[in-house]
């Protein structure tokens, strides 16, 4: 029985290891095939060894990136760079071969009939000029591809940094994840009893909240006011609306733009606790700032 169990465990581990291996990258395989073909070309191997080495080094980096499960975009980029450098090696070899023809024609010019050799030299010069122009174009394309990759990476890093900073700010304000999005709650204790005037103790909290909006121009939120069930429903609705608008006015006075905020009062609707206890009623008297999923926030639960 123990032998059968050990065998089953071994097979399961082997299958797991196989399933975790990444699929081959077709662009990388094609680029490596082109490199092998160029390495087997005696003219390229003899006349462009440095260019071949650069292509080989680039594809070694691509193979390592693939083996390390790095992003496919990086593997694709390195495979593209390696393939282009193989082309550069091939065309460099062709250019140097043409240069040899030109040199040979010049050495023999005094002892051979020059008309045919001159024509060959002219064709070689044309081939050389074409190859050099092609190499220049490909070198420029490689430089542009590198620069574009660096710019894209810089933009991604900057975007990630802004998102992380915003997430940190909202977590410091005790943002909670709900079905509607991330919610920052201002409790009733930040208002005068039964009034919509914010107390001075709310200033620091609102300043930190305003800073999050100002640092992220695309950030929007809905400000929602709520009350407990004590009193008439119309009065409760009016109080919740005035408290929500008071928060919006305070944030705008701190530099938040009007279009970043919407306001609505819900009165005694949507309680978060029982209205039968003092503590429950206090929890229901609140203003919520709701950052919806369209804000692109990813906070810890």
Image: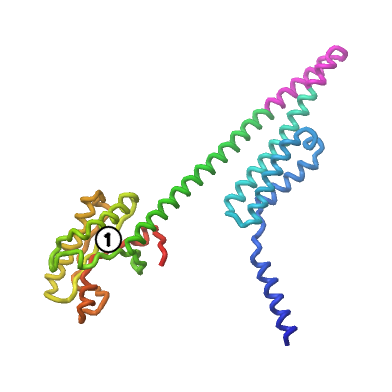
Compared with residue 191, is residue 33 higher up or lower down, i.e. above or below?
above
- Label the magenta part by its dominant secondary structure: helix
Q: Position of residue 117 (x, y in %)?
A: 81, 19
128 and 145: which one is in front?
145
Q: Residue at x 36, y 67 (%)?
A: 177
Residue 109 drawn in magenta: yes
Q: Residue at x 59, y 53 (%)?
A: 72
254 and 128: which one is in front?
254
172 and 251: which one is in front?
172
Q: Residue at x 81, y 19 (%)?
A: 105
Q: Quadrant of residue 187?
A: bottom left
Where are the magenta residues, as a range?
102-130
Residue 113 drawn in magenta: yes
Left or right: residue 118 versus residue 22 is right
Disc 1 on helix, strand or loop? strand
Q: Residue at x 35, y 69 (%)?
A: 179
Q: Quadrant of residue 191?
A: bottom left
User: Can you name the residue that lies furthest to the front here?
Assistant: 201
Q: Quick one: label 1, few (<14), some, or many (20+) residues within 10 Å?
A: some
56 and 113: which one is in front?
56
Which residue in the protein does label 1 denote? 222
């Amino acid at each position: 029985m123990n032998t059968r169990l050990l065998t089953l465990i071994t097979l399961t581990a082997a299958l797991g290891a196989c399933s975790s291996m990444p699929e081959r990258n077709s662009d990388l395989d094609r680029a490596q095939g082109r490199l092998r073909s160029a390495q087997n070309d005696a003219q390229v191997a003899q006349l462009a060894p440095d260019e071949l080495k650069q292509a080989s080094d680039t594809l070694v980096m691509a193979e390592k990136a693939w083996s390390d499960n790095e992003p496919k975009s990086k593997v694709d980029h390195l495979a593209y760079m390696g393939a282009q450098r193989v082309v550069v090696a091939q065309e460099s070899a062709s250019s140097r071969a043409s240069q040899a023809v030109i040199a040979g024609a010049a050495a023999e010019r005094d002892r051979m009939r020059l008309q045919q050799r001159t024509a060959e030299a002219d064709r070689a010069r044309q081939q050389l000029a074409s190859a050099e122009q092609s190499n220049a174009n490909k070198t420029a394309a490689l430089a542009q591809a590198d620069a574009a990759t660096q710019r894209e990476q810089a933009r991604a890093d900057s975007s990630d940094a802004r998102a992380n900073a915003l997430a940190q700010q909202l977590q410091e304000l005790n943002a909670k994840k709900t079905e509607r999005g991330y919610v920052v709650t201002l409790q009733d204790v930040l208002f005068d009893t039964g009034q919509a005037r914010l107390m001075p103790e709310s200033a620091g909290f609102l300043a930190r909240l305003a800073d999050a909006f100002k640092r992220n121009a695309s950030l929007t939120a809905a400000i929602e006011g709520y009350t407990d069930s004590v009193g008439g429903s119309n009065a409760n609705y009016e109080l919740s609306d005035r408290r929500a608008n008071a928060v919006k006015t305070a944030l705008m006075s701190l530099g938040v733009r009007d279009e970043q905020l919407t306001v609505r009062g819900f009165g005694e609707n949507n309680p978060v606790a029982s209205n039968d206890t003092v503590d429950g009623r206090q929890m229901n008297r609140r203003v919520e700032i709701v950052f919806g999923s369209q804000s692109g926030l990813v906070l810890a639960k």
